[in-house]
Amino acid sequence: MTDTLFPERERLREELTAAVRAHPVPAHIGIIMDGNGRWAKQRGWSRIRGHQMGARRVDSIVRAADRLGVRYLTLYAFSVENWARPSFEVSALMRLFRTYIVRKRAALHAENARFRLLGRREGLAPEILEEARQSTELMKNNTGLTLNLCINYGGRAEIVDAVKKIVADGLRPEDVTEEAIARRLYAPDLPDPDLIIRTSGEMRISNFLLWECAYSELYVTDVMWPDFDEVELLRAIQSYQNRERRFGKISEQLGNRR
Ligand code: IPE
Ligand code: IPE
Ligand code: MG
């Protein structure tokens, strides 16, 4: 079965790659990696197994995005709300994150990638923070794709944290601008995501990049995260390339069709 399906998938990958390369690719893609639990349940497996298989998906997507010229990839791995899950699932996820950061350090570095953890530091285990710090430090002079891993991340929390910094910096009301807030987000130099992908069909943002998603194009697919391969990424980018981003203006003002 796979012998006949695989070449077909490969042909599709090549076709889509050629089509996508003919147009500008999004500089920054955010992904809400959802559906690990349901994917596992469909197979009668534990949710943890779903998360493990989900983690395996990350590599090929990072490589594919980099090859296509995507500059920033922001992956939503654990929200501030996810602490409310059963404690054994939370512990398994935290172990998985730590292992992932350590195991992938050399490979990401070899691919000229940069690495950053996005989220609230308070609440995260010191070991995770330390491993992430080492990865960021090692790769800080690389020039390829930047991988942002969101762990203990919440969009509202990020805005609250930015407002706290504004207060601590003693800004006067007239100095509180959109730029002043944007400069105090977790990654001030990160451009807003051009495209946000959510897997597993849920039509919601679930507290992901609330400030930054103001004008992001949204793409939702029913494919569960552990099944999200390069072909699916290409489909999402192709959908993005067929949109007209108007930023409040009207079509006639934009001067191009894409
Ligand atoms: C996404 O998959 C991963 C995390 C939120 C950590 P889920 O675990 O949410 O999978 P579903 O939505 O239950 O299928
Ligand atoms: C969003 O998925 C968070 C991550 C993918 C890390 P959830 O599965 O937690 O979102 P809800 O609860 O369905 O909105
Ligand atoms: Mg979910």
Image (tube, grey):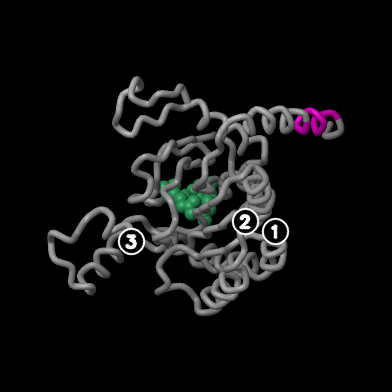
Q: Which residues are magenta?
A: 4-10
Residue 79 screen position, x and y as percent? 43, 58
Instruction: Decide if residue 35 is on the left or right side of residue 191.
Output: right
Instruction: Give the amino acid at mark 3.
Output: Arg
Label 1 CB sits under 8 Å from any ligand 2 atom: no
Is 5 inside the magenta-drawn segment? yes
The crowding category of the residue bearing disc 1, from other C-alpha atoms within 10 Å (few below 14, some 14 to 19, many at least 20), is some
Upstream in sequence: badge 1 or badge 2? 1
The crowding category of the residue bearing disc 2, from other C-alpha atoms within 10 Å (few below 14, some 14 to 19, many at least 20), is some
Instruction: Decide if residue 40 is on the left or right side of residue 4.
Output: left
When the figure is inspected, residue 171 is found, relative to residue 145, above or below; the finding is below
* Real-space CA distance between mark 3 and mark 2, rounded to the nearest whole angstrom: 23 Å
Q: Which residue is mark 2?
A: 144
Label 3 CB sits under 8 Å from any ligand 2 atom: no
Q: Which residue is mark 1?
A: 111
Q: Residue furthest right?
A: 3
Upstream in sequence: badge 3 or badge 2? 2
Residue 183: numbered disc: 3
User: Disc 1, disc 3: CB below 8 Å?
Assistant: no
Q: Residue furthest left?
A: 173
Instruction: Give the amino acid at mark 1.
Output: Glu
Q: Quadrant of the N terminus?
A: top right
Residue 49 screen position, x and y as percent? 65, 55
Look at the numbered disc 3 and give the secondary structure of its residue. loop
Instruction: Give the amino acid at mark 2.
Output: Gly
Residue 102 screen position, x and y as percent? 65, 70
Upstream in sequence: badge 1 or badge 3? 1
The crowding category of the residue bearing disc 3, from other C-alpha atoms within 10 Å (few below 14, some 14 to 19, many at least 20), is some
For image coordinates 23% across by 67% down, the residue present is 166
User: Disc 1, disc 2: CB below 8 Å?
Assistant: yes
